[in-house]
Image: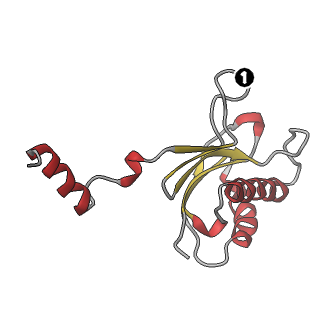
């Protein structure tokens, strides 16, 4: 005869109150490591069908901020697209993003580039005037993607 605890647990699991993700392993995309001198974070962490993506900025390959804000935004979006692809996702799997901007005067520049990266619906988004960003970047974006059923 099952114990009361086992019965309650199975009932909650069947009703969906206990997430299957709690038992799933984490997959690290572009992982950081405490054993190295790299930045102390991973590029993205996948748990179940959800991908949590770290903040990213649109620097050039030599680590510089482009002179043109649209080039910086494009670099950022291409990096995001690449990171999503490494995990088996697309830009249309993004459900929410937060964009931090050094000066909201770049809002239109960012949007002109951003809208080109989505085929269906845009993710929920916040665009926040944040002041100075790392390396004097204009934009930083973080997001959450959920793998869509095909």
Callout 1 secondary element: loop
User: Where is residue 77 drawn, in percent x and y?
Assistant: 74, 58
Residue occupied by mark 1: 36
Residue placed most toward the observer, 100 or 23: 23
Mark 1 surroundings within 10 Å by alpha-carbon count, few (fewer than 14), some (14 through 19), many (20 or more): few
Q: Which residue corresponds to the image point at 71% horizontal and 53% vertical from the top-left? A: 83
Q: Is residue 62 left or right of residue 51?
A: right
Q: Which residue corresponds to the image point at 34% horizontal and 53% vertical from the top-left? A: 19
Q: Is residue 76 left or right of residue 44?
A: right
| Color theme of the render | secondary structure
User: Where is residue 74 drawn, in percent x and y?
Assistant: 80, 59
Counting labels gives 1
Q: Which residue corresponds to the image point at 58% horizontal and 76% vertical from the top-left? A: 121
Residue placed most toward the observer, 64 or 26: 26
Q: Which residue corresponds to the image point at 8% horizontal and 49% vertical from the top-left? A: 1
Displayed quadrant of residue 97: bottom right
Work out which residue is located at the far front of the displayed protein and give it. Answer: 1
User: Where is residue 14 drawn, in percent x and y?
Assistant: 24, 61
Work out which residue is located at the far right of the displayed protein and give it. Answer: 62
Above or below, 16 against 33 in this view is below
Residue placed most toward the observer, 17 or 103: 17
Q: Is residue 41 left or right of residue 47?
A: right
User: Where is residue 142 drawn, in percent x and y?
Assistant: 60, 49
Viewer can see residue 102: no
* Rendered-image quadrant of the C terminus: bottom right
Above or below, 108 against 44 in this view is below
Viewer can see residue 65: yes
């Amino acid at each position: 005869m099952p114990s009361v605890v086992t019965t309650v647990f199975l009932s909650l699991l069947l009703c969906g109150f206990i997430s299957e993700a709690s038992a799933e392993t984490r997959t690290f995309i572009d992982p950081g490591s405490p054993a190295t001198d790299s930045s102390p974070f991973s590029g993205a962490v996948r748990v179940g069908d959800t991908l949590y993506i770290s903040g990213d900025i649109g620097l050039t390959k030599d680590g510089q901020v482009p002179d043109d804000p649209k080039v910086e935004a494009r670099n950022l979006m291409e990096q995001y697209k690449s990171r999503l692809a490494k995990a088996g996702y697309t830009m249309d799997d993004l459900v929410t993003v937060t964009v931090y901007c050094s000066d909201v005067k770049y809002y239109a520049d960012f949007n002109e580039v951003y809208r080109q990266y989505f085929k269906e619906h845009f993710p929920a988004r916040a665009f926040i005037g944040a002041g100075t960003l790392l390396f004097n970047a204009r934009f930083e974006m973080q997001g959450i993607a959920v793998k869509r059923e095909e």
